[in-house]
Image: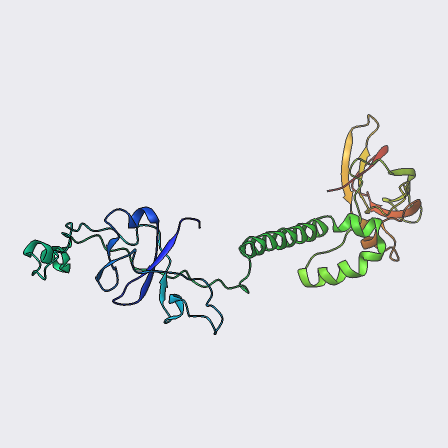
Amino acid sequence: MPGEKYTRCPGCSTVFRVMPEQLALRAGQVRCGQCKTVFNGIEQQVSLAAPNPPEEPLSEAALGPPTLTLRNAQALEAVNVAPVPAPATSAATPTPAAATAASPAAVPAFTEPPAFTEAPPVDRFAPPATTSRRGRTIAYIAAILVLLVLLAAQAAYHFRDSIVTFWPVTRPAFERVCEVAGCAIRPLRDDAMSYLSIEASDLQADPAHRGLLILTATVRNRANWPLAYPHLELTLTDAQDRVVVRRALGPTDYAAGTADIARGIAGQAEISLKVFIDASATTQAGYRLYMFYP
């Protein structure tokens, strides 16, 4: 830095960085912060330039390996000294005042500069400060992905019937999962009866057995995918269309023995049913037949 100078303590050879203004305060008189030696900083100035070639005289910086302490301008403080009287022409003994001024004990003390603390070495191979932030970001992304996978698995479990219905190739995988989870895969239901309909039905007395009725009907599935077998409600009425007896029939009551109830009624297909009903204890004149899901 322009204007900086260097001075060496003659007591401990410590080199200090000073400013010209500091040396001019007390005619250059300063005190070393290392060994407390009072010396003239102007007279002890040194140069830290590179040493001259061997054939030239060495600079003062090459006299020894100085302890270089690069401090600010306050590292050395000027001290007050009494003016030294001009020496007499005769060999007179110095006056007590002059001796006192030249004595280090008479130099006022100054605030000792703080101890020099070396900066910690910089690890060039240390990871950048953004490593922890990048690690947290990766952890957040991983957590989000795990949550999305869990959400997808829960949705697949909840809508497994629809998935298997519209993507039959997934049935084996879901069947294996249900074997472990204890669930079942069922065909979809047509609660609104938008696709299931009774195409034809008839209720006749069995001529071979008195009091036995024979119910025949055709149930059609107009959807393109399988639908669960519905329940049937058979209501017998009298001549005034009043209810005489009502009976609910489950799929196992009317489906043929070869029907796969677990797979439902195939899309764009129909089933025919025939049920024998014991009505020997009732007298009926008509009937009504409905479909429903319990």
Left or right of residue 73, residue 288 in this image: right
Choose between 3 and 199: the one closer to the eye.
3
The quarter holding residue 169 reads: bottom right
Q: Position of residue 148 (x, y in %)?
A: 66, 50
Point out the residue furthest to the top here.
Answer: 240
- x 10%, y 62%: residue: 91
Q: Position of residue 274 (x, y in %)?
A: 89, 48
Quadrant of the drawing holding the C terminus: top right
Q: Is residue 219 above or below residue 51?
A: above
Left or right of residue 219, residue 184 in this image: left
The quarter holding residue 289 reads: top right
- x 83%, y 46%: residue: 227
Choose between 191 and 139: the one closer to the eye.
139
Q: Is residue 56 above or below residue 175?
A: below
Left or right of residue 161, residue 217 in this image: right
Point out the residue furthest to the bottom here.
Answer: 54
Do we see residue 252 in this rendering? no
Choose between 245 and 257: the one closer to the eye.
257
Point out the residue furthest to the front here.
Answer: 89
Q: Position of residue 9 (x, y in %)?
A: 28, 63
Left or right of residue 132, residue 150 in this image: right
Do we see residue 6 in this rendering? yes
* Number of numbered discs on residues: 0
- x 88%, y 58%: residue: 258
Choose between 189 and 121: the one closer to the eye.
121
Q: Tell me, what colour scheme is on the image?
A: rainbow
Q: Position of residue 140 (x, y in %)?
A: 59, 52
